[in-house]
Every structure is written in structure tokens, then in C-alpha cells.
Amino acid sequence: MWLFGPISALFVALVGVLAIVTTSDPHKKIVTYPSHVEIKPSSYIVEFEDHLPTTHADNFHTMPGVNVHHQYEHVFNGISVKTQNEIDATHLASVDGVKRVWPVRYYKLQKTNSSSASSFPFVHQPTGVNQAIKRLGMTGKGVKVGIVDTGVDYSHPELGNCWKTPGCPWQYGEDFIGDSYNPKDPDTAIKPNPTPMDCDGHGTHVSGIIAGQGPTVYGVAPGVTLGMYRVFSCPAADGSTHTSEDIIIKALESAVKDNHDIINMSLGGGGWPFEPISIACTNAVKRGITVVAAIGNDSVGGLHSASAPAVAEGVISVGSVSNWNDTGAMATVTTAQSSKSVFISMPVIPGKAFVFDSATPLAAPLDLAGSSLGCSNITDDLSGKIAVLMRGTCLIETKGKMAQNAGAIGVVLVNNVPGIVYPAIEHPFDIPMVVVPTADGQFMMEGISHGATTIVAHKYNTSTIPIESGGQVSTFSSIGPDPLLNISPHILAPGGNIYSTFPLKKEGYAILSGTSMAAPYVVGAVALLKEARPELSVSELDMLLSTTAKPALLAINESIAHPYAGGSGLLNVYNAIKARAKISPPRLSINSTTWGPISGLVGTQYIEPVRWTARIITIENTDKAKSVHVSSNNNAADSLSMFFPNGSIAYKPRVWSSNGDNDTEPMVYAPEMPESIAAGATEQFTVFIIAPKGLKESDKWYFGGYINFKLQWENEASAVDYNIPYAGFNGDFAQLNPINLPDTGLPVIVDMNDDPVENVYELAISRKAPAKFRLSIAVPSQLATIKLVDANDNVVGYLPNGYHPFVPHTCPVCQSASFLPYAINGIAYTDKNSRNAVMAPTGTYHIHVSVLRPFGDINNASHYQIWDSPEFRIE
Ligand SMILES: *[C@@H]1O[C@H](CO)[C@@H](O)[C@H](O)[C@H]1NC(C)=O
Ligand SMILES: *[C@@H]1O[C@H](CO)[C@@H](O)[C@H](O)[C@H]1NC(C)=O
Ligand SMILES: *[C@@H]1O[C@H](CO)[C@@H](O)[C@H](O)[C@H]1NC(C)=O
Ligand SMILES: *[C@@H]1O[C@H](CO)[C@@H](O)[C@H](O)[C@H]1NC(C)=O
Ligand SMILES: *[C@@H]1O[C@H](CO)[C@@H](O)[C@H](O)[C@H]1NC(C)=O
Ligand SMILES: *[C@@H]1O[C@H](CO)[C@@H](O)[C@H](O)[C@H]1NC(C)=O
Ligand SMILES: *[C@@H]1O[C@H](CO)[C@@H](O)[C@H](O)[C@H]1NC(C)=O
Ligand SMILES: *[C@@H]1O[C@H](CO)[C@@H](O)[C@H](O)[C@H]1NC(C)=O
Ligand SMILES: *[C@@H]1O[C@H](CO)[C@@H](O)[C@H](O)[C@H]1NC(C)=O
Ligand SMILES: CC(=O)N[C@H]1CO[C@H](CO)[C@@H](O)[C@@H]1O
């Protein structure tokens, strides 16, 4: 049964949302996370009320059973503590002046799809970096960049081969964690090394993108001064690399203290702007530091998959585009008939170079299933040979293992789609592997079937092949908006198949993909822009980079990317430096609309009611000598929906193709826009944005597009494009129900085998025979509660983890998984932290779910979506 709250007043909520933290009940100040979130034992981040001085921490230094670990003062008003004995979050929350108590979460560095390489990056042309460096002489000189990451192999010749010596690019930074920290080990300890040497590779790769010195890796801003703040341990036995929130905030503090102009962060949290890391980033921005963060690699989660701290206020959120060229090597294949030069990828496993200086035989073995896939045992003896296998059907690592078991000394994997892929390898095998394009693989197979066939592959014999989707939004790049309907990402940079530096112990070079590679590109671009125009403020840097970017296409069907996927588009730092106009705001996040006839828009057909909003645009002609002619145009993008017509979540967004039909596209009018702006003058005018009136609101479309301004100072041919993305929800977002409909299968009660239970009442639930309850949340919610209620409508308590603030959008398939099963086993908790357990007596019960709607006020019952399960018995 569904219970809908009464129609609530529009958008009163944001103030209320922030007000939740000032309540005096200590329990209300404690944040809890569901059980799948890894928490550091007995460790908390304690946030103080904003007005309190940092000396407030003194109250905790003297508190028995509390060890203050970190005392923050620059980016976060609070401390991190470790507690002993009976001291818990409730004790901490009861201290005067405490705003909120957070358990400390562990963070994992996400797996990279990698491959070692040696070549030249070809990405600096379309991004304007080549022109900024070569024509304008910019290098980022005098700009300080702090990087929070896995450390750096500063001994790399292309990264300076120095540490804090005079003239060295590395002048700042330290290790905050050490090599062996592992949250799974109870005796784990933080043992920082004297320098932040990288044993993972991620931070070294990022450093090369920002500031590689050449001759093979040319960073975006090779002249910057750098600091490395290492917050990740070395990869553990299972390959995972760890850190925790308190350490990251400490590193961020240190970077802020060192007075960097730009800080680089990307960690992928829950996606709320109110989380500790987000708060710390926003505070750094307020101190005049540009903070750049990757939006995440979770496009598989669909809309609302943007992560924190990219969603933090003031932080530049970065998405990724595909590279234009793939770097690999040429190898020579000789068959009985002929010889051919073939393109091979970089080694799939970094450190396992595919080098065969003399002719080495190729074999095309069959597996037990009689196929060339290598998915089952290979009985041929492959000793001294390289196995040629087809991609597909089973994991790449299975193929590698099968070839290795048969004695092969290498594997050539023949791609089954155009181009090259860099497959993710979870469990590396011992022999080198490369990927080849389909045609080159077929040439090998064909040769082998006619006689002896060999390959010669030298080290560092590099080459490139074009990537079809070059410059288009990477298929992995997460999709916004943030939970408050702000456009995220802000901007795109190359992040797919990026060649950069890697630790010398791991071959020295690698190709990695991810928004983590795009974010440092933007860091470098901001450094160039700041060097060229030092007077710009943090928000002006963002504004100029964004308004001069070029809207990107989607790889899938080459339609213009919705701003939630592509932000302002691909950056062009040369255009940003040369910009002669400031257009603000740089993006129009339409978080509220009006339903009715349009007031103020005279002489149009909009006397019928529509969903619309009006915004003010300001254009400053910064050219002090010339006036500028202005014209504008609306480029509508396809509308997206995260729901199928039956109410299920569409993780691959449903698309309404924009086809030039004014009825189903968003419309933009700017009736007051001036035709020209005098030299040095500023003009303001209203734009009216109208949601697609022909699309049904019940389909919950997110519309968007770009307002394109053509600014012409000289002749028509030299007109310059500036773009402002706009996007919003075709309906009343505050009325959107976060949980989807029960008749689509969720929320649902499932048995221990995860099978949905048909007749729940027949299910005898007990401690021994528990059931589970699943819920999926389409839009992030500030608070979800799941309570056990008896037949008389008395609340027994919360299900375990049934009090859940800051719930991210549910994504069963994301890197940061957030699918929530709640155990039904008769136990309920009367408090929010699952401490005071009660056992429900035998009887009839149901589950009562409340989920706060977008923009909702946590204290207003009518702002929650309510759902009650069918009744079941507990025995
Ligand atoms: C919409 O965004 C503006 C600007 O960020 C903000 O001031 C306002 O509070 C937001 N409104 C709602 C309903 O969230
Ligand atoms: C994105 O993926 C890349 C490569 O897989 C990884 O290095 C990076 O940490 C990821 N970043 C986020 C924010 O998920
Ligand atoms: C890709 O490689 C080709 C050939 O090496 C080169 O001409 C082209 O400029 C590269 N593309 C980009 C975008 O740099
Ligand atoms: C690279 O490989 C190609 C094809 O095998 C060969 O023609 C060329 O001479 C090699 N170059 C170097 C520098 O080894
Ligand atoms: C495959 O090979 C492994 C060892 O190499 C062996 O243990 C296994 O029994 C084989 N499987 C089959 C189906 O032959
Ligand atoms: C990594 O590779 C897998 C397939 O092997 C692909 O699905 C995924 O999108 C890749 N991730 C990135 C960040 O390139
Ligand atoms: C691509 O365009 C087609 C129609 O032109 C549309 O049906 C499809 O949904 C679009 N897909 C995406 C993801 O844009
Ligand atoms: C759509 O609107 C534009 C701008 O108002 C107008 O020029 C065009 O004729 C309209 N097209 C249709 C199909 O109504
Ligand atoms: C809802 O529709 C989608 C798309 O047609 C389908 O994949 C999904 O299975 C449907 N869900 C249910 C519960 O019927
Ligand atoms: C700007 C940026 O995100 N570059 C690196 C900065 O730090 C994060 C932290 O892990 C890296 O993931 C980024 O690649």
C-alpha cells in the first residue's frame, strides 16, 4: 500500500536540511552508515559548531578514554579521535558545541585498467594546451599544485628525479600513511615514510599528466611547483589500496597550509555535498584555492551517479572524454607466405613487457571445447610459443592462465570489436599479454593455419592508431546531477586510454583510463590559465574554462551530450586564456520551475501554461577597445529519464531524442538580449527556459541543452563561441518519490536465497530463518528509515542499519556499490546506531519505510515518501 504525503509547499526545504545538525538530542548528531560501509573501529570525526574556535578541541584532549588523532583547523572545524573503554559516539555527541559525529570510513582506491607503454601523448591539440604552451609560452610557472594521491615516484626522469632540492618541481608534501596500512588487519598502524614514494602507480601517473617534463610524457603544465600528499598505502595482497577519511582531511589541511593554488582530489564517496570530505573541500575553495575532483567512473549507475567530493560546492567536477589515438607498438609477423607489420597494444599487465627480439613462434591452440577462446584447458604443448586467442566469453585472466598452464611464453589476444581495449585484470598471471586489432589477429590465425608463423616485437617501438570515439564522452564517465539538481560534471578532459609516467619499478610508463586521469588534466589547465591571468578568482577560473569549452558528443550515438553527462564540454585552455568576455553564471542548474503562463515574455505563444523558469545572464565585454556583436542560439540535448514507463529504474537512461520538434525540446528565449555590448561594458538580460511541453511529466524527464552565444568583435569569420549549459527536471522535483513502485519488484522481501517471497505472511521469520528486505532508491535521499512495526501499529524499532542518512542513489553494479539489504530476523534497535537491541515477541509485523524526498525538510513528515510492506509473522 502506498501512502502519499499531502502536496507540500515548494522548496522550503534546504534551510531545514541544514538545520538538522543543530538539534540538541545527541543521537540526532550521530551519522550512521549501513553495514556494507567499512568503518574504522572506535574512530570518529567530530565536527564542531561553525562559530566555535578550534580551541574547542581542548575539551577532548582531557576527556578520559579519548585520544585525539588529528586536530583540523583550516578546512574542517573539528577533530578525529579514537576512543577506548565505554566511550562511544553518544558520549562524543553529548559534549557541548558538537555539531555532528561521523564514524570514519575507509576508502579504497579503485582498480585501474592499465597497460604499460612508451610513446607520446597526442591529446594536447584539441584541448588548446599545445597553443597555450607553444604560442603563448605558458607552463604554469609560479603556480603551486597540491596532489592528494598514492604518492609519486619522484625519481622518474620525466618527473624531475629530485625531492625538495632547489629547482626541483617537488617542493611540498609528505607521507601521511606508510606502506602497510590495512584496515582488515587489527594491528594495522600508520607508519609514514620520510618521503611520499609511490608503490601503487596512480599518483605517479596523475603527476605526469599535470607536469610530465618530457621527452615522452609532456604534462599539461610542466612549469608548476608541486606537492604530493600521500594518503594511500601500498597495494595489499588482494591488490586493494586503502585509506580513511580522517587521513585524507589531514592531508588536505596540510596542502591548504602549504598555500597551494590548486588541489587535486578524487576519491568517490557517497555523493552528498554535506559529507566531511566535501565540507573540507568547500572550505579550501573559500580560502581561494581551486579544488578539482573527478566525478567518478560509475556511468553504469545512470543519472545521479556523481560522487563526492566532486559534488561539493565550489569544487570543479570533471568528467572524461576518450583519447583520439591509442598508443601501442608495431611488431613484425612473418608467415610462410608473407611478412606484415601489425599493431600491438601495450602490455596488458604493467611490468610484464611483451618483448621478443628474435623470431618467436605463434600458435593458435584449441581449448577443450574446441574453440580459440582459451576458456578451458589447452592440451597442446605451447612450450616456447606465444598463444593467439580470441577475446570473449570468459575472463581475460582465464585465457592467460590456460595459455600459461600449457607452457606458453606470451599471449596475443585478438580483439572482437574495432580498435584496442585495455581489459581490467584482477588476478594477474605470469606471462605477458598484448591485444591486437581483429584484422591483424586474423592475419596471424590465417598464417598459422598455413605453416610456421613467427613474431618479432622490440621494446619501445611505439606507434599509434586512431580511436573512433576520440573526443566523445567516455562510456565510463559518471552522470550527474548532484542530489540538489546541480549540473555535474562541470567540464570534460581526456581521461580514456591516457599514457603517462608510472613508477620505475613498474616499467616507468602506463596507459590508464578513468575520470581520475581527466581531473589532473583540468588541474594543469587551471595552472596555465592562472599563470596567464593571475587576477582571476576561483570562480572566474571555473567560469572561463567552462564557458569557452566545446559541448561534446556521446560515443554511443553521436548526439550532443546532455549537460548531466558532459557539463560544459571539452575544455580549451587557449580559448579560456584569450577570452574577451565573461559570461555568468557559467551554467544554469534549474532546481525550481514554475507551472503557468509565462509572465514577462511578451508577444509569444506562451499564454498557455508551461513549466518554465527565468534566469539573469550577465555578459561583460572585457575588451576595453572594441564593442562586440552578440547573437544566441539554443542547442537542445536529448532528454533523459531514469525510469522505465513501468516505474523501474533505467540504469542506462531512457532517451527522448531531440529531433528539432519544438514541442518535445526545451526552449530558450532571450528577448532582452542586447545586439551589441560596448567596449568594457557589462549587460544583463533575462533568459526564459521552458521545459519540453510535449513530454509527459509522469515520465520524469531531465531536459537540458546549451545556450550558444556567438560573440563577434571583428568580422563574422572570427566570431567566437561561448556556451552555457542548462538542465533541469520536467516536473516538480521535490515531489519525486525516491523509492520506485512496489509492483516493479522493489522494495521487496526476499528469503535468504534472495528469491522474492510471494506470500510473505506464510513465511515464518525467526532468528534462525531470517529474511531480507531490499529497497532501491532512485534519487539520493537525505534520510531513509526502515522500521519494524507490530500489528497495533506500534514501532518496535529500526531494522539493523535501518536509520540511514545521506543515502546514495542505489547502484547494484557500481564501483562504489550501494545496494541495501536489511535483515529481518526479529531484532530491532530502539536507537539509530544499532546499539540497543530488542527482540520482537512472536506476532504479526510489517516494515514501515520513510524516505525523504529531494530538497525535503528532515523534520517535516509530509516531505517523506512512505511505504508499508505486507504483514508477515515473526516466531
Ligand atoms: C536553487 O539554487 C540556488 C542557487 O544555487 C539556491 O540559492 C537555491 O536555494 C536553490 N533552490 C532550491 C529549491 O534548492
Ligand atoms: C576511476 O577509474 C580509474 C581507473 O579505473 C581509477 O584510477 C580512479 O580512481 C577511478 N576514480 C573514481 C573517482 O572512481
Ligand atoms: C592522432 O595521431 C595522428 C597520427 O599520429 C596525428 O596526426 C593526430 O594529430 C593525432 N590526433 C590528435 C587529436 O592529436
Ligand atoms: C618497429 O617495427 C617496425 C615493424 O616491425 C619496423 O619496420 C621498424 O623498423 C621498427 N622500428 C624500430 C625503431 O625498431
Ligand atoms: C585442467 O587442467 C588442470 C591443471 O592444469 C587440471 O587440474 C584440471 O583437471 C584440468 N581440467 C580438465 C577438465 O581437464
Ligand atoms: C575497464 O575495463 C572494463 C572491461 O574490461 C570496462 O568495462 C570498464 O569500463 C573499464 N573501465 C575504465 C575506467 O576504463
Ligand atoms: C541514440 O539515438 C537513438 C535514436 O536516434 C535513440 O533511440 C537512443 O536511445 C539514443 N541513445 C543514447 C544513449 O543516446
Ligand atoms: C521552433 O522554434 C524556433 C525558434 O522559435 C523557430 O524558429 C522554429 O520555426 C520553430 N520550429 C517549429 C517546428 O515550430
Ligand atoms: C520494466 O520495464 C523495463 C524496460 O522495458 C524492463 O526491463 C523491466 O524488466 C520492467 N520491470 C518490471 C518489474 O516489469
Ligand atoms: C585532480 C585529480 O583528481 N587528480 C588526482 C588527484 O587526486 C586523486 C586522489 O586519488 C586522484 O584520483 C586523481 O587522479
Image (cartoon, grey):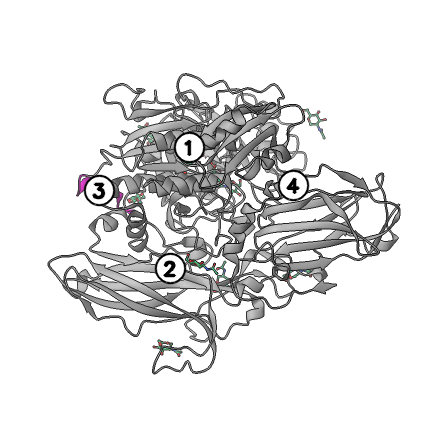
Name the residue nearer the viewer: 729 or 596. 596
> Closer to the N terminus: mark 2 or mark 3?
3
For the magenta stretch, what is the residue range? Answer: 126-137
What label does residue 534 carry, if any?
Answer: 3
Front: mark 1 or 3? 1
> Residue 330, how many percent across, how many down?
37, 33
- Pointer 2 with pointer 3, Cβ within 8 A: no
Q: From the viewer's side, name the closer residue of 759 and 436.
A: 759
> Could you give the CA–CA distance between mark 2 and mark 1, rounded to whole angstroms?
36 Å
First-in-chain label (2 vs 1): 1
Percent across and percent down for residue 701 are 52, 65
> Could you tell which of marks 4 and 2 lies nearer the N-terminus?
4
Does the magenta portion include 150? no
Give the residue pinned by disc 2: 725
Which residue is labeled 1 in the image? 73
Residue denoted by label 4: 34
Residue 132 located within the stretch drawn in magenta: yes
Q: Compute the Cα span from label 4 to label 2.
A: 36 Å
Question: Tag 4 or tag 3, which sits nearer the N-term?
Answer: 4
